[in-house]
Image (cartoon, rainbow, N blue to C red):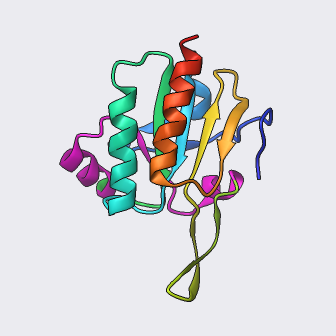
Amino acid sequence: MLSQGDRAPAFTLFDQRSQKVSLTKLAPKSVFLFFYPKADTSGCTSQALGLRDLIKGNKSVQLIGVSPDLPRTQMKWDNKHELRFPLLSDPDHKVSAKYGVWGSKKLYGKEYQGVIRSVFWISNTGRILECWYKISPKVSVEKLTEVLERSNE
């Protein structure tokens, strides 16, 4: 697991428009990076909509979502809900594993591997400012509210 002060693992992934997005190319903004299990599910949609509504008009923080979904699936989700921020595809789970969010989960007594919903606030210099593992959709929206207040100070 990553901690405050650690260097955020670099990545380049395709977004919903099949464009490459690299963490290192996002400066001078800080990044609010959230990992979610599956596009267009109820929890992920409520999380994405809540985060989208908070970030509108903000110029200091870039919102980015990451899931194992393919770009075409994320594009459908983006079009359906007008998310308008990068949704990155990590189908082989390499980036999720680097961030410590790919692991064992349980649902209805069955154990499986999947994305553990987590959020990272990354500085424009690539350092982890805050990280929240196993976070709920609702609490992730609360954390972005705190981040935006702190970044405007």
Image: magenta residue range: 73-99
Vertical comparison of 25 with 112: above or below: above
Q: Position of residue 90 (x, y in %)?
A: 52, 56
Does residue 82 belong to the magenta stretch?
A: yes
Tag count: 0
- The residue drawn where x is 76% and y is 47% is 2
Specify the quadrant of the image occupied by residue 52. top left
Please give the name of the residue rendered at 71% of the width and 34% of the height, measured from the top-left corner. Answer: 128
Looking at the image, the residue that sits furthest to the top is 153
Residue 87 position by quadrant: top left
Q: Quadrant of the C terminus?
A: top right
Q: Is residue 140 above or below residue 56?
A: below
**Residue at left offset 48%, top offset 27%:** 62
Residue 98 spot, x, y in % from top left = 70, 53
Q: Which x, y percent locates residue 143?
A: 54, 37
Residue 85 shows in this picture = no
Is 32 covered by the magenta stretch?
A: no
